Image (spheres, helix red, strand yellow):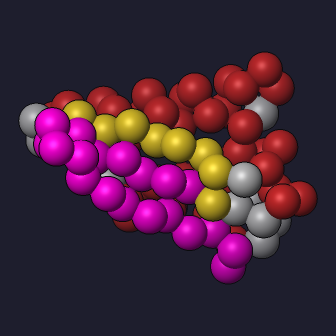
Amino acid sequence: MKDLLLYIARNLVDNPDAVSVTESVSEGQEVTLELRVAPEDMGKVIGRQGRIAKEIRTVVRSRAQRDGLKVSVDIMD
């Protein structure tokens, strides 16, 4: 999941070297992915009215569901 999120985010932003993803697993076996990008690229990842962020979450969740996992994506600033 981490690699998929990195791939998507790096192709959206102007500064792909600043993209990082931190992965953590909670007690309920839910994986949380924290996405960090450069401040000037934040708008490109979120999109108008959060549409791009919503679609990123949808793609990652659907991929995780195929593997039987629960994943949440947090975009950190």
The answer to whether 53 appears left or right of 42 in the picture is: left
In this rendering, does residue 15 appear at all?
yes
Residue 32 colored magenta?
Answer: yes
Q: Which residues are magenta?
A: 17-35
| Residue 59 quadrant | top left
Residue occupying image coordinates x 70% and y 62%: 37
Q: Is residue 34 above or below residue 73?
A: below
Q: Is residue 29 above or below residue 17?
A: above
Q: Is residue 74 above or below residue 18?
A: above
Residue occupying image coordinates x 44% and y 64%: 22
Question: Which residue is at the far left?
Answer: 68
Residue occupying image coordinates x 49% and y 64%: 21
- 77, 1: nearer the viewer: 77
Q: Position of residue 60 (x, y in %)?
A: 38, 40
The answer to whether 6 appears left or right of 15 in the picture is: left
Q: Main secondary structure of the magenta part?
A: strand
Question: Which residue is at the far front?
Answer: 27
Q: Position of residue 53 (x, y in %)?
A: 62, 34
| Residue 58 quadrant | top left
- 72, 49: nearer the viewer: 72
Residue 62 colored magenta?
Answer: no
